[in-house]
Image: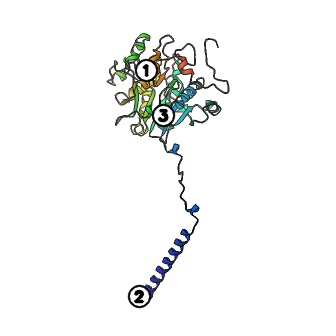
Amino acid sequence: MAILRKINQILLFLLVFTLCIILYNKVHKMPSTILKTEPVDLENPEDMEEEIPVVICAASGRMGAAIAAINSIYSNTDSNVLFYVVGLKHGIPHIRKWIENSKLKDIKFKIVEFNPMVLKGKIRPDAARPELLQPLNFVRFYLPLLIHEHEKVIYLDDDIIVQGDIQDLYDTKINHGHVAAFSDDCDLPSTHEMVRSVGMQNTYMGFLDYRKQTIRDLGISPSTCTFNPGVLVANMTEWRHQRITKQLEKWMQKNVEENLYSSTLAGGVATSPMLIVFHGKYSAITPLWHIRHLGWSPDTRYSEHFLQEAKLLHWNGRYKPWDYPSVHTDLWEKWFVPDPSGTFKLIRPNS
């Protein structure tokens, strides 16, 4: 039996060896054109490039703002930008058609519907500045629920124009243990004169009601400089780990119960929870990447030279560049893409 087993092993070896020789000969007799190795494009090089997710809200009545912001970003970078355009259900068809039927049809974008029911019971009604209570103002609170595929995300208010390469903003360093990067409201001496001239608030005193014990118990000095959450770069993993959304919702709920801040104060109801939750725990955005207050007064202007150096312009305040009166509208309007449906129109002195 042992001899028979050995013979079978030898025969099996000879069979395998013979098959190898046959295959070898067949391959080497093939025409050289078939054997030629062509480079295989396994993946589009553009897809291999890191994607930069940018979140912008498209609110009814001001969709032209989101369009201008998107166009300014897209036109000033060669980076692989993916726009998350967030809207409410009734406004989504309009913004989709605007993008698909204009010069922006080639951008990479996803439409995301925001469900305002998540805010039920978390916002105190306030008639002083109802525009600050719009549901899309709170989209930034829920970034991890809207964006799933990305580690790092840029959120931008719609009333901005980007003049630099968005890659530079995306590369903002977020320090270990921090969730996000913001612009400190005391970071740029050039803006201090404007802040003083129109009476803007850039300290916590202007946003929180320090007459309330709950606010005093935070231990935050009322003279502490604030930051502006209209432009932020966030780490989604750290956001989830620190349960930032839950923390923000907690302070929204506390405000409903105790009226700790209101839209009669400087920043309304969306800024104040962020000032509390992120106090002392955020990294810095380069100052020229967030030049603000352009919408605070219809009379006060920055120098043209200063604005040309700016990487990002923000018309925060009541006076928007698609409306009238407003300032530095030429810097905004150059990026505006007209609404193919004719629904959204710029308001100008002669209109």
Give the CA distance from mark 2 to mark 1: 92 Å
Per the image, the residue denoted by label 3 is 142
Q: For the residue carrying disc 2, how many other residues have a C-alpha within 10 Å: few (<14), some (14-19), or many (20+)? A: few
Q: Position of residue 248 (x, y in %)?
A: 43, 30
Q: Secondary structure at mark 2?
A: helix
Q: For the residue carrying disc 3, how many other residues have a C-alpha within 10 Å: few (<14), some (14-19), or many (20+)? A: some
Between marks 1 and 3 in the image, the one whose residue lies nearer the viewer: 3
Q: Position of residue 58 (x, y in %)?
A: 57, 28
Kind of residue indicated by mark 1: Tyr
Kind of residue indicated by mark 3: Tyr
Per the image, the residue denoted by label 1 is 261
Kind of residue indicated by mark 2: Ala
Between marks 2 and 3 in the image, the one whose residue lies nearer the viewer: 2
In the rendered image of this protein, does residue 110 appear above or below residue 133?
below
Tell me the quadrant of the picture where the N terminus can be found: bottom left
Q: Position of residue 293 (x, y in %)?
A: 46, 18
- Answer with the quarter of the image where residue 278 lies: top left
Give the CA distance from mark 2 to mark 3: 74 Å
Q: Secondary structure at mark 3?
A: helix
Nearest the camera: 117 or 152?
Answer: 152
Q: Earlier in the sequence, mark 2 or mark 1?
A: 2
Question: Residue placed at 39% from the left, 15% from the top?
Answer: 192
Give the CA distance from mark 1 to mark 3: 20 Å
Per the image, the residue denoted by label 2 is 2
